[in-house]
Image: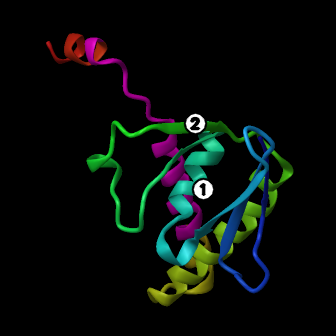
Amino acid sequence: MKCQWGQVIGHYYSVALILSFSRPATLVVIVEFDLQKNHGVLVEQVLATKALYIQAGREGDSLKHDVNLPKVILEVPETDFGRKIWNTIHNRYTTEKMRELGLNRADAKRAAKQYIAEIRKLGTVRMGSPHDLSKNAR
């Protein structure tokens, strides 16, 4: 499998992960992440973990109800997109959202930077095994 980040023409506040499979069948999948639907957190997690789970389902399905269904984990290597283009898109969108909340330009930029930093912090939180958790709870 090969992957590449990009944007769909005309979709200003979204990014796409293009997945090209060669086995067992030739297939191209485009997964679009829309910032207007709060998918920015997902992109941050994919970039932080360098991985993505894919699981078959239908619209409206929830992982918590289908946790035992087969899934595939894909490696998503670091690319120039990750910290150059994505940072620009995410920062621009988040700053505009902060402006819509009534902040002036300087405060909106500052708030956007803080917000994105907090999202990235969440991506570094790792839970231990159940054994580790029960040991720490004592």
**Residue 121 falls within the magenta-colored stretch:** yes
In space, the residues marked 2 and 1 are separated at their CA atoms by 15 Å
Q: Is residue 4 in view?
A: yes
Seen as rendered, the residue at the extreme front is 25
Residue type highlighted by circle 2: Ile
Way the structure is coloured: rainbow
Q: Check if residue 78 falls in the magenta segment.
A: no
User: Residue shown at 75%/86% (left/top)?
Assistant: 10
Q: What residue would you read off at disc 1?
A: 43
| Start-end of magenta stretch | 111-131
Q: Residue at x 20, y 15 (%)?
A: 134
Q: Residue at x 14, y 12 (%)?
A: 138
**Residue 23 lies in quadrant:** top right
Whether residue 65 sits left or right of residue 7 in the image: it is left
**Does the rendering let one see residue 114?**
no
Q: Is residue 137 above or below residue 122?
A: above
Task: Determine which of the numbered discs, if any, sits on residue 64 in the image.
Answer: none
Please tell me which of labels 2 and 1 falls first in the chain: 1
Q: Position of residue 18 (x, y in %)?
A: 75, 58
> Residue lying farthest left?
138
Please tell me whether mark 2 or mark 1 is closer to you in this view. 2
Quadrant containing the N terminus is: top right
Residue 73 at what x, y percent from top left? 58, 36
Q: Are marks 2 and 1 in contact (CB under 8 Å)?
A: no
Res 73 label: 2
